[in-house]
Amino acid sequence: MQTWMKVFEKNFEEVVEDGPHPDFRCFISSEPPGLPLMEIIPEAVLQNSLKVANEAPTDLKSNIRRAFNRFDEGHFERSKSHKHTEFKALLFGLCMYHALILGRKKFGSQGWSRAYSFNDGDLRICGEILHNYLGNYEKVPYSDLRYLYGEVMYGGHITDNWDRRTNNTYLLVLIQPKILEEMNLTLGHGFKSPKADRFDRAAYLQYVDEKLPPEIPNMFGLHPNAEIGYLTTLGETLFGTILACSGGSGGGGGGKRDAVATELLQRFLAALPAEYSMIDLNARAKERSPYVVVCLQECERMNLLTFTIRKSLEDLAAGLSGALNVTEDMEDLATALFVNAQPGPWVKYAYFSLKDLLGWWDDLLLRMLQLDEYCEEFVQPKSLWISGLFNPMSFLTAIMQVTSRQKGLALDDMTLKSDVTNVRDPKEIPEVAEDGAYVHGFFLEGAAWELGRGSEQGYLTDMVLKDLHPELPVMLVTAVTRQENSKVGLYECPVYVTSARGGTYTFTAHLKMESEEEKLVI
């Protein structure tokens, strides 16, 4: 859609200028973008449009009522011929499930890694499936219902396997025999499934109105910190949209923007280190071990990024001084500098990052500092800041390659094993690991880490209030065969480059857990 929208925008402007019919209206339909940073419809079109949307409510109570109202009295009369009590209980559980997965969207990437269009059509078809299976089976086929709901109907929208795991865990918790025994329907305490044999349709709606507690993140299975993150993101998105629509202009006009841009570009040019001499590095790299190859690849990508930064800043400086004509790219760069946003041309060659420009710049200098140490003798650091690499998976793959060569094992049969140490400061690591590598730079979301006693490994625990992203201690990553990699008592934790998740998935870490797995998954 993005490929032809600019052509459409131009044609639309021509039609409007030619004086269309007074009743002329143009409707553009679009699903929400798959990721928060994606833009589908151009800003100029949005500014001259009215948005018409049919979206589900954001609060849990409205979503439950809306879902339950999709099933009229005829459904309840129809169920009297096949397990009437079970139908009422499971239908209410289905509506609860529908409301929870819709309400989870507002927590952003912590709710779902990608945007999914769960809708009322899925709910109605699941209701029909419930009728059919209760009528055709002597016993309630809970596992069959969970599979059809989680893998076929709602699961048909889901493209991320980790989101699929979350979705199926909700069904595992809600669609089970205990739903007939007044179990908790929300993941937090306080809202139980009513006695189905004593409730009719109207009583269920009244029960939702009177008994549903005030909405909190715990009801979705999330920590209260999720609401802090949600509100913070909401505020940042709002102000980001205001800046984007205003073009970054302030009360001082364009002169103020140019002054800020000039100050920043001078600061950046003065601090930007020289590019790496790849000829010299390749000459010194006598032994091309996997770790050396990773270092050279990182240096090449850093050179491309620093060259782009330097050239664009020098061109902008020449444009602001009058030596060159100011192009559209220069205007965009000046605006990005003024609003403290990452410039588009830099993002194209950079690594995934959600930081503002100044934070991103400091992060860039730290990455180059680590690369300087790495390429000096081509010896891996005692503990590598893995999130400081363009491609973290390349270093993890190098661990498997080195191990497979040393032990004569097939690379295809290797997998990563992660052991979290009790060392929080990477500087306390005495020497490079004999097997595998020490890495740091991991942050948790939705959980915290409790250090172990002595030589015992720590474990995942509940978050501390207002500590949104606690840092994980130094991790020892080794390569083992798939048969040797035991997963008993370990939580399969997906590792992403940024908190936006989505397409930034890197690998799966296996972390020790003390609580139930369902709680950590949700």
Image (tube, helix red, strand yellow):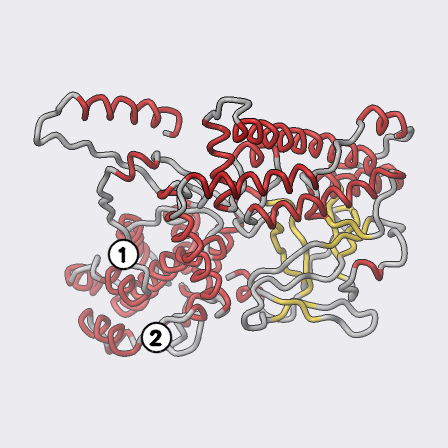
> What numbered label is drawn on residue 214?
2
Indicate which disc, 2 or 1, sits on the residue closer to the N terminus. 1
Q: How busy is the neighbourhood of tag 1: few (under 14 within 10 Å), some, or many (20 plus)?
A: many
Give the number of the mark in front: 2 or 1: 2
Q: Residues within 10 Å of mark 2 (few under 14, many from 20)?
A: few
Helix, strand or loop at label 2? It is loop
Name the kind of residue labelled 1 in the image. His
Q: Is residue 243 visible?
A: no
Inspect the image, locate mark 2, and give the three-letter code of the amino acid beneath it. Answer: Pro
Between 85 and 220, the one nearer to me in the picture: 220
SS class of the residue under badge 1? helix
- Residue shown at 21% from the left, 57% from the top: 70
Position of 365 with respect to 95 (left or right) is right
Q: Is residue 307 left or right of residue 134?
A: right
Residue 131, numbered label: 1
Proximity of marks 2 and 1: CB atoms separated by less than 8 Å = no
Task: State the image coordinates of residue 233 (x, y, percent, origin top left).
Answer: 45, 56
Q: Where is residue 172 in the image (x, y as percent from the top left)?
A: 46, 62
Taking depth in this image into account, of 213 and 330 the one nearest to the observer is 330
